[in-house]
Amino acid sequence: MDRTYLNRKGIGKILQIIFFALVVKPLVFIILGLNIRGKNNLPGKGPAVIAANHNSHLDTMVLMSLYPLKKLYKIRPVAAADYFLSSPMRAWFALNIIGIIPLERKRRVAKKELFSGCHDALNNDDILIIFPEGSRGQPEQISAIKKGLFHIVNERTDTQITPILMHGLGRALPRGEALLVPFNCDVVIGNLLTKPETADDFVSQLESTYQELKKYCITIKH
Amino acid sequence: MITIPQNSLIAMLVILCLLVIGSISRLFIEKKNPEKDYTELRQRIQSWWWMIGILFACMSIGETYAIILFGFISFLALKEFFSIVPTRQSDRRVIFWAYLSIPLQYYFVSIEWYGMFIIFIPIYIFLFLPMRMVLIGETKGFIHAAGIMHWAVMLTVFCLSHIAYLLVLPEKNPEAGSMGLVIFLIFMTQFNDVSQYIWGKALGKHKIIPKVSPNKTWEGFLGGMLTITLIAALIGPFLTPLSISLSLLAGLLINISGFIGDVVISSIKRDLEIKDSGDLIPGHGGILDRFDSLIFTAPLFFHYLHYIAY
């Protein structure tokens, strides 16, 4: 499989900017539409991690669109290698235009090797987007949170986690659907998580934060 | 070549002057109380500049562009409505069809097909959407969903498209042109909101409907009525084909229906326990927060005018 990256500061960056300016941002801000809460909590520079809930392919597009075009190349979604690298076309697009960090979900590998891509990016002051539920799950429901993210930040002193809750994208483009239906979506950006002591502490902290952030959504009937 | 009828041009310039006065007063207030935060006021006025600027620009470069603009506003409003009300996951495809009513409805406006414009949504969309729902076959919550969807399309597409139809009516007051009608309707509706607010702030004591909107008072409502009917009587003959007394009645109609539109949208938001319907217009909230009164004033003013002058 061809995994060569384009130059992330040169041609890759330019193609990414063109794609986001002409396709992604109009899609996110006009066809969809965001109700953003807590915009000041969004991490401005790396190393940092965004932990968001995951219902739709649009999630990554929405989160990246929160950043200005010239910062996009520093924003790195961590995504499943088994899905996004499954065909050469998709892999080229995911690696170069979106700038994903592929993660091997299926193969058993040592933790160190598993997260090496993430650590490289964080060392490079990038901002990672991680979906701790692992996959998209049922529309508008939060599935069990996995512990991988804890192991990434636990080894580092320089990286903190910003929780983001999104709601509405599972209505706009749920898993397994090809037809996009316009809806406004809530994006609620929380305060930094306090440094978790254990993996279980991380999971419970993130779960309760998501519940708390849900109160700020206007697309949920309370 | 851009041609704006004289009276409409004067009205536009007056509105722009009011905006300039608003912006300058804001600067003065900020200078006087430097410790207070005026971000919301600043955003509100800035958003007014944008909204009025876009509206005037589209109307000036041509009727078609203004029709497209109102279609786009309908899209934003419908999207906002569907986003805040609970919808079933199985209705996604029906909602998609509901969106498709927008280009059709505004197309009928643009070709001046009044007969179709007036029945397309109340009849064809009304009957089509439940049929599409039946094809999906989810019966749990069917009544609720059918009701919500049709109400949404009526409010945000049918009612708002009446503003666009004003633009294609034959010109009965050539000095103002058809855009004079739109300026009259929008300006009177928004000024009604403002004057009810100011009268209410200054004199308000007796609440009208405390359960829905605790800030609405009889004093505000009646003060607004006085202000708006007088102003309407003054500028109606200038911008519309209506005489002074008929303009006065138009002002009264806009005053009452604007109030009702405002509190109806407020009731929706109360039911959903939200304050704003969206984030789109900084300082104002969502599209529905800004167009609440206009949703009611547009069709009522249109049909009043249509009955009297056409």
Image (cartoon, coloured by chain):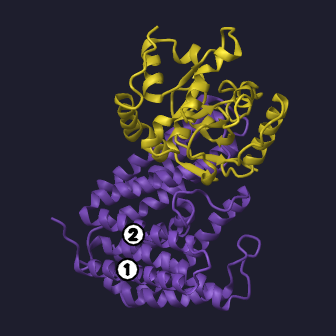
Please, is residue B141 above or below residue B15 in the view? Answer: above
| Residue A163: % across, % down | 69, 41
Q: What element carries label 1?
A: helix
Q: Is residue B5 shown to the viewer in this render?
A: yes
| Residue A68: % across, % down | 46, 46
Residue placed at 67% from the left, 60% from the top? B268
Q: Name the residue under label 1.
A: B15
Residue placed at 45% from the left, 53% from the top? B119
User: On the picture, is A205 further left or further right than B222?
Assistant: right
Q: Name the residue under label 2.
A: B52
Q: What element carries label 2?
A: helix
Amino acid type, residue under disc 2 in the picture: Ile
Please, is residue A86 above or below residue A14 in the view? Answer: above
Quadrant showing the C terminus of chain B: bottom left
As drawn, the chain in purple is B
Protein chain holding label 1: B
| Residue B81: % across, % down | 58, 52
State which tag comes first along the sequence, 1 or 2.
1
